[in-house]
Amino acid sequence: MRGKGLRYWNDSCHQRSDEGSRVTVLAIIPARRGATRLPDKPLRLLGGAPLILRVWQRVLALGVADRVVVATDDFAVQDIIETAGGVAVMTRTEHPSGTDRVAEVARLAAFSNADVVLNVQGDEPFMDELAVRGAVAVVSSGQAPIGTASVPADIDALASPDAVKVVCDDSGRALYFSRAPIPFLRDKADASLRDARVRLHLGIYAYTRDALQAWVALPVHPLEQIERLEQLRPLAAGLAIGVASAAPVAVGGIDTEADLLRANAHWDSIHAVRSPA
């Protein structure tokens, strides 16, 4: 993490993190080709370049991590990153989650000096800097051994099973994550999404080295399998997950063909070259 004295407030979960000393951050981007809803996802094009390359470039540009590594089970992904001058590590194919893939790389001797391990999903090319820094600050400040981030929800996202909701306690720690609408707004006419602290979870995690290895040593939990949410494994085991606050982004994770179309439209809009007057 670069710099000192940075502060992060979570206005919805009443969380503040203070970074008093510099920590070494290792960012690992898990990428596999086995996605069913968007086949060959890491290789699909965003702005004319493979998605995994765009994500890697974004993590580098944020300047949060001392080292950035792609963890993959595919030689094509490895070749893309190494051709661009980056580091990509081949991992086993049979990992049950991205965190398990990240942990395999974090155990390697070459990366053993990192204080915090940052997991950025390989389909988040527009990730918010505050979300990434906030997740790291949760861990580096000692608030929780695992950090993540959330953004305010709108009513459409609340009802969508593709949008993961998180409810926090008053100290900013996650109580539960779900694809279901939580909290349930029983008296919809009297409740606002802000008052109900309805938040959407972002697929960013930071961990202490011990917390990461403790997570992957746990057996897959029934709640994790039911909801298809890996973060329920450590949560059910009692590991604290601190949740930082971030601003909404125009395009989130890319999981479907429709998401990819929206992402390319957004890319074109922010990278359009203005014609001279």
Image (spheres, rainbow, N blue to C red):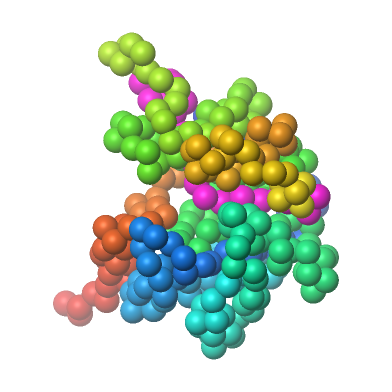
**Which residue is painted at 71% across and 34% down in the image?**
237
Q: Which residues are magenta?
A: 192-212
Q: Nearer the viewer, residue 197 or 156?
A: 156
Q: Quadrant of residue 259?
A: bottom left
Q: Position of residue 9 (x, y in %)?
A: 60, 37
In the rendered image, which quarter contains the N terminus? bottom right
Q: How many marks?
A: 0
Residue 197's place in the image compared with 212, above or below, is above
Q: Is residue 132 above or below residue 218?
A: below
Residue at the (54%, 76%) spot, across then down: 74
Q: Is residue 191 left or right of residue 27?
A: left
Point 53% across, 59% down: residue: 121
Q: Is residue 204 magenta?
A: yes
User: Which quadrant of the figure contains the C terminus?
Assistant: bottom left
Residue at the (58%, 36%) spot, across then down: 222
Tell me where residue 22 sits by quadrant: bottom right
- Let me know if residue 223 appears in the view: yes
As drawn, is 271 to the left or to the right of 227? left
Question: In the image, residue 182 lies at what x, y percent?
Answer: 44, 26
Quarter of image, res 175: top right
